[in-house]
Image (cartoon, rainbow, N blue to C red):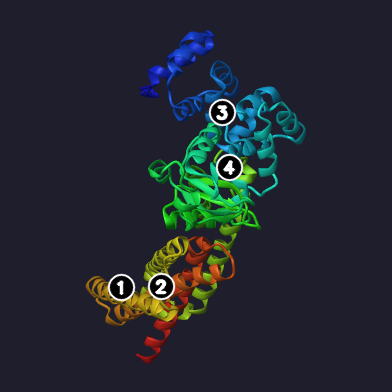
Amino acid sequence: METLKEFELSKEFLDRFRLALEEKDDEFVINSLEGVNPADITALLFEFNTEESKYVFDLLEPDVDADILIELDEDIREDFIAKFTSTEIASFVDEMESDDGADILMQLPLKKREEVIAHLENEEKATHILELMRYDEDVAGGLMAKEFIKAQMNWNVRQCIEQIRKQAENVEKIFSVYVVDEQDRLAGKVSLKQIILANDDMKVADVFDDEIIAVETYVEGRDVALMMQKYDLEAIPVVNARGKLVGRITIDDIVDVITEIAEEERALMAGISSDVEEDDSVWALSKARLPWLIIGMVGGLIAAQITDLFSADIRIIAGLALFIPLIMATGGNVGIQSSSLVVQSLATKSAFEDSMTSRLLKVLLVATVNGVILGIMVFGAVILIFRDQPLASTVAIALFSVVLLASFMGTITPLLLDKFGVNPALASGPFITTANDLLGLAVYFSVAHVLYSLG
């Protein structure tokens, strides 16, 4: 059995490999990378410049080059493939499944794209790629591959096995055999186990499973990912508006979608408004961060105005100013905790099966427990440190109120954003923090004003 070589990217190996590139030692390069997983080769190439990486590429087999290209990040790949001729790119694409080939071609200028298609040896693959390029990359039609195995319902098992052998030449991984009717409309699926156990003369119609989950070509990639995650699918068939089977989406494609979703939400939660990388230009990075920084600054100015409204109270009770950071930090933390849980639940579509009233009641109860515990702790701490009972009561009551309000805001904000079609991850970032800072200050000074007025 052929096994992949264990690969360690050590400093010693890098130094030796770099020397081999300088000396054009083709034998060392080829021997050291023989049997190495393409993902490991990709990691190695990140250590070298474009010209050096292309030199390595030229020494490898086209199927290995194809796998490496698939592994590369899109931004790096776009610059890298520009170094190759149309004929060379076509040789790589010929080794890929149609969905990966379409992704590569979409990164090329129109003229070069047409040249690559013209140089493809597999005409059927060229047709498949052209069809896939019609779809937006973020929908099921743009994610699917055209390579799959299907069987007609009226075939017998013997015919089915013969067709599987023919079709499997172009399919890298076989998860299921999809069953279609005479009009190529998806009817169900049949497992390889069922085919093997069935008699040769039995009809596919007698052994297939008509319960199958499929998606239409226009379904958003995010929804496809959620569906595959919910039903624990390794692959999902794609049908057009007429129910005709046109492709399949495999788990490796969906992992990429899930990664992109996670990166997008992480950026939103960090207050970055667009898709940027660390090596982007200074202006691009600044432009992505500025909007929420400006919102935070405006929030700070409003907070200053709120503080100014109660400046008379602060002058009389100077101790109030000491606890402004505590109130603001606690409100922000509670809001982020609540909103993060809601965003996570919305992402899995498993939350809020109960009524909204019962969910909000639960949030209120949790906030009450946390608020009481924090209030008691801060009351005791202020009494011990400052020996000021009115101040301790004010801070404790204000903190309790802020915890309740921040929990409510952190829960309701992502729900409202989701209802209006806005990514709820926004509610876990600077938006909720700034809002809770302002509300926390307003509540704190209002409580202080009322209690000291009554006192």
User: Closer to the camera, 356 or 295?
Assistant: 356
* Dot 2 amino acid type: Ser
Residue occupied by mark 1? 370
N-term-proximal mark, 2 vs 3: 3
- Whichever of labels 1 and 3 marks the residue nearer the N terminus, that label is 3
Q: Position of residue 139 (x, y in %)?
A: 61, 52
Q: Which residue is mark 4?
A: 145
Q: Nearer the viewer, mark 1 or mark 3?
A: 3
Hey, which residue is sitting farthest bottom in the picture? 454
Q: Earlier in the sequence, mark 2 or mark 1?
A: 1
Circle number at residue 407: 2
Residue 24, percent from left and from top: 54, 9
Question: Mark 4 or 2, which is nearer the eye?
Answer: 4
Label 1 element class = helix
Helix, strand or loop at mark 4: loop
Q: Is residue 114 left or right of residue 377?
A: right
Crowd tier of the residue under label 4, counting other residues whose Cα lies within 10 Å: few below 14, some 14–19, many 20 or above: many
Mark before the other along the chain sequence, 4 or 3: 3
Q: Residue furthest front?
A: 201
| Distance in Å between CA atoms under marks 4 and 3 | 16 Å
On screen, residue 23 above or below 274:
above
- At label 4, the amino acid type is Ala
